[in-house]
Image (spheres, rainbow, N blue to C red):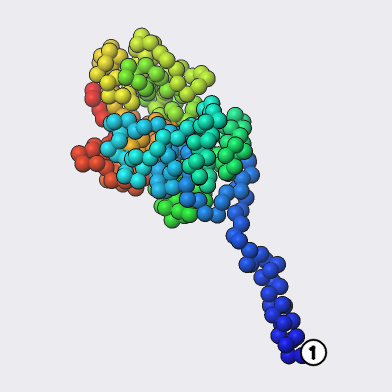
Amino acid sequence: MSLAKMVLVAAALALAPALASGAGKPPQASTFVDAAGRKVEPPTDVARVIPAGPPAVALIAALAPEKLAGLLEPWPDARRPFAPDAYRSLPILPRLTRSISEADLDALRRVQADLIVDYGDVGGAYALAADRAQAALGIPCILLDGRMAEIPGVLHRLGVMLGRRDRGDELAALAEQIIERLHPAASVEPEKRVSVYLGRGADGLLGVRPGGLAGEAIEEAGGANVTPPGAGAFTKLSLLDVVALRPAVAIFEDPAAAAGPLAKTLDPKTIILVDRGGPFGAMEAPPSVNRLVGALALATILHPDLAPADARLMRELRERFFGPLPEGAAIIPLERVR
């Protein structure tokens, strides 16, 4: 065999293992099994992400705000000052978790995103919606479990997918710390739980039901949600309905409700709190990673012996997730007004 042939054979033998292992090929995304058991092939490089619902907005804003393709609703005036510049003026996108038109789909196609993220409930209806969105837009859509206990794992997995492993692991570690700190209050017996009413709206009469993601922070803080259970996350109540529930603590997401007829009619012994969270609500609105803030703040009020107040930790939690607090903002996001 000539020297030239020997060189070629040696080179081929050296190259064979690399070819067999896929070296030299474009990087392929590994299959991602989401919380609904769907197998998705995410891209290896994600630059822009479409949030399917409000909880996904808060999740992506905490993890990689520069990748957020848009918001799903304008910032409320009270929370806009808390929003970092990276996503304060983002465009408003159609919401994929609701009925969506062909015009909406065209608007989303123009975004030219690489990934759709839905975060929250992961039942059959959401899986079907994810499949439809993925087929209509031609980009992968993943579902992530929104339960509070799953927050650390979600932050880690999505951080890896978005190329933000270090950020994801940093926030996951902080989330684990908060969940551990909440454990004594979250584990109290039913007879030791403090009755809590959480109301939306300027009148405070849209009650947040127990058992779902929107009311989960109450249970994790050692509270007992007094709003009647039922289908859906919310139920419209009358003033007398809420008064009859006799909550020991009432939390209003709109400051107007804390000064309105309902607050004035509740038992004088009822503690009234206003959710001053930002850029997202502390208790829910939306039910996402922001609930760690509300659950911890509420636990220090309901069970101070089990969850001692720690302003330093509260500031760290809020600022590491969503950036510096604006000048003059209260560190504790649940303001007691009575």
Q: Where does residue 242 sit, x and y in percent of width and height?
A: 37, 14
Residue that numbered label 1 is attached to: 1
Q: Where does residue 98 sit, x and y in percent of width and height?
A: 52, 27
Q: Residue at x 58, y 44 (%)?
A: 140
Q: Is residue 172 above or below residue 197?
A: below
The residue furthest right is 1
Q: Residue at x 36, y 9 (%)?
A: 240
Q: Is residue 224 above or below residue 155?
A: above
Q: Where does residue 173 sit, x and y in percent of width and height?
A: 42, 50
Q: Residue at x 61, y 57 (%)?
A: 28
The reply to whether residue 40 is visible in this rendering is yes
Query: What's the amino acid at mark 1?
Result: Met
Q: Along the horizontal axis of the image, is 57 left or right of 144?
A: left
Give the number of marks: 1
Q: Quadrant of the C terminus?
A: top left
Q: Quadrant of the N terminus?
A: bottom right
The residue furthest left is 328
User: Would you identify the image quadrant in which residue 226 lies?
Assistant: top left
**Residue at disc 1, secondary structure:** loop
Q: Where does residue 332 sit, x and y in percent of width and height?
A: 27, 36
Q: Along the horizontal axis of the image, is 172 left or right of 273?
A: right
Q: Along the horizontal axis of the image, is 257 left or right of 127?
A: left
User: Would you identify the image quadrant in which residue 291 lies?
Assistant: top left
The reply to whether residue 178 is visible in this rendering is no
User: Would you identify the image quadrant in which residue 305 lies?
Assistant: top left
Q: Residue at x 53, y 28 (%)?
A: 100
Q: Is residue 80 above or below residue 33?
A: above
